[in-house]
Image (cartoon, grey):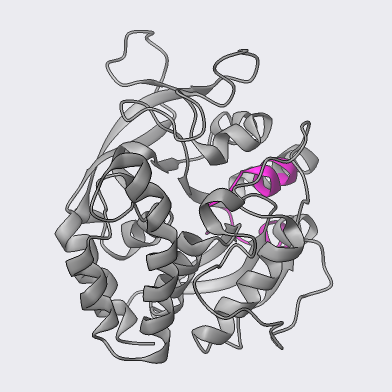
Amino acid sequence: MNKPLPVIIDCDPGQDDAVALALAFSAPEIFEILGVTTVAGNVPLNLTQRNARLVCEICNRSDVEIYAGCDKPMKRELVTAEYVHGQSGLDGIDIYEPEHPLEKTHAIDFIIETLMAADDNSITLIPTGPLTNIGTAIAKEPTILPKIKEIILMGGAAKEGGNVTPSAEFNIYVDPEAADIVFKCGRPIVVMSLDVTHQVLTSRKRLDRIRAIGTKTAKMMTDLIAFYERYDEEKYHTDGGPLHDPCTIAYVLKPGLFKLKDINVTIETQGELTRGETVADFWNVTGRKPNVQWAYEVDDDGFFDLLNKQLKKI
């Protein structure tokens, strides 16, 4: 049997981050979670670190260590998304101060120290929020790069268009400078952009199926999704909203769900109208060397079959 994959999950919970964490927590035989690091994004850092600890308690994972990271982007003021996630970031459930501890080490130091102590090509990073923590760690200690096996991130948009500006997805828009560092880092990168996450819609039928699992965790995940989807349902006129962040975890659990293409992606950091755009050269018109695997299609029914199967284990 293969050993579990050593991972650091970097997130800004957020209801969809919570579902992504639950999905990862459900598979200890697949994921060796070295730590969960949090960043300011969907809501400020004091809430994202609390929310990550809260999800640990919801999912009965007292063994997972939580580290708080950067409270603002590398060069810009923080932009948040309470209009989507609510003031707590996890609106839809009762919020309380969890007993699950916050580690004293700063997330950047944890990331650097963990990677420096690891073998080359051994640790997978899974960022589902703005890339501030990852970009800052690389900028501070570039010798960590050979240790990274792969970066599987949620962010960006091309054919689907942006969700915070006409051309930019939220995570990349919040900290384009950090994204620029990550996309230029030279390590293998898999990108779950809006092009694919907008295919994974939480329809009423799918949500009812999750609720029918009947466990406390499944009910709380259903309540989180039900609150979260209301914004996108109104915006896109769809039955349900997209579950962005869990696509990163689903890709590790069942990569065959996704179709990917090797392409070049550059990050727009200067554009007045296009800040945070992921300039995706899908048809190789620039001749630039591919630097990412870009997910562009997903078996959405298979995704929700997987999510149901895994949530039953918690």
For the point 41% across and 41% down, the residue is 191
Where does residue 156 sit, x and y in percent of width and height?
A: 45, 34
Query: Seen in the image, is 88 located left or right of residue 298?
Result: right
Residue at the extreme front: 234
Q: Compared to 156, does 64 lie above or below?
A: below
Q: With respect to residue 59, does 292 lie above or below? A: above
Q: Is residue 3 visible?
A: no
Residue at 39% from the left image edge and 61% from the top image edge: 249
* 221 w.r.t. 98: above or below: above
Q: Residue at x 78, y 75 (%)?
A: 103
Q: Dividing the picture into quarters, in which one does residue 312 lie?
A: bottom left
Q: Is residue 99 left or right of residue 184?
A: right
Identified at 43% across, 80% down, the residue is 220
- The segment highlighted magenta reads 113-137
In the image, 230 versus 278, the foreground residue is 230
Position of 98 with respect to 94 (left or right) is right
Locate the C terminus and report the quarter of the image it occupies.
Answer: bottom left
Q: Position of residue 174 (x, y in %)?
A: 63, 37
Camera-nearest residue between 240 and 288: 240
Q: Depth check: give the residue in front, 36 or 144.
A: 36
Task: Specify whether residue 229 is in view.
Answer: yes
Residue 2 percent coordinates (x, y): 35, 74
Q: Residue furthest right?
A: 104
Choose top left, top right, bottom left or bottom right for residue 86.
bottom right
